[in-house]
Amino acid sequence: MASVDLDAIDLKILRELQRDGRMTNVDLADRVGISAPPCLRRVRKLEEAGIIEGYHAMLNAPKLGFDLVAFCMVGLKRQSETNLKAFAAATDRWPLVRQAWMVSGDSDFLLHCVAENLTQFQDFVIEVLTADEHVDTVRTMLTIRQVKRAGLVGI
């Protein structure tokens, strides 16, 4: 991965793209105060350096029938590198798990889950998650309402 020294314009570009990844290069250039050709070169440089990993549509989960968002704190039976890697790989096979983090503290993993309803989530927790050979404990938290939704990096 290439190393990139970020200046104020690069940070403005990143901030604007987090707000709206679909804007045209001309609009982006106008917003950050430079002309379009150097703006495009900067964006490509940020992409090549791996700072911009991709562009995604933000979907409205409830409008698609996914009404439940929950977090699972998972503790493994053993925290060996093999078990940690195996569990991390397993999360890729579980469609309800939308994001997963290996964490420190009382749990080993934090899973962000999205399900159609409580029954689907409960079935996942009971039949899949707690049934995994590496899992020792699972604590769940059902969300009430999302109160903030921002880009992943506050720049």
Image: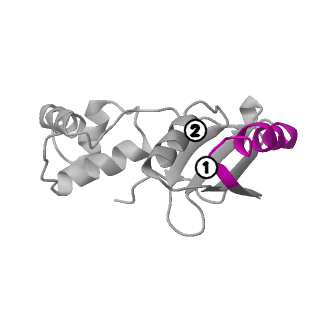
Give residue 41's quadrant in the image: top left
Indicate how the structure is coloured in the image: one colour
Residue 91: where, in percent of width, then height?
57, 38
Q: Is residue 134 magenta?
A: yes
Residue at left 63%, top 40%? 97
Residue 38: where, in percent of width, then height?
12, 36
CB atoms of marks 2 and 1 within 8 Å: yes
Q: As drawn, which residue projects farthest toward the bottom?
A: 105
Q: Is residue 84 toward the left or the right of residue 128 in the image?
A: left
Q: Is residue 11 visible?
A: yes
Residue at left 29%, top 39%? 28
Q: From the viewer's perspective, is residue 151 above or below residue 2? A: below
The stretch in magenta equals 117-136
Foreground label between 2 and 1: 2
Instruction: Give the CA separation, mark 2 to mark 1.
Output: 8 Å
Give residue 128's quadrant in the image: top right
Residue 121: where, in percent of width, then height?
79, 41
- Mark 1: few, some, or many residues within 10 Å (few <14, many ≥20)? some
Quarter of the image where the C terminus is located: bottom left
The residue closer to the viewer here, 34 or 141, is: 141
Q: Is residue 53 toward the left or the right of residue 73 in the image?
A: left
The residue closer to the viewer here, 81 or 15, is: 81
Label 1: which residue?
111
Task: Kindly state the secondary structure of the residue where label 2 is placed.
Answer: helix
Q: Can residue 58 be seen in this view?
A: no
Q: Is residue 12 magenta?
A: no
Residue 30: where, in percent of width, then height?
25, 42
Label 2: which residue?
91
Residue type highlighted by circle 1: Leu
Residue type highlighted by circle 2: Thr
Residue at left 24%, top 35%? 47
Task: Kindly state the secondary structure of the residue where label 1 is placed.
Answer: strand
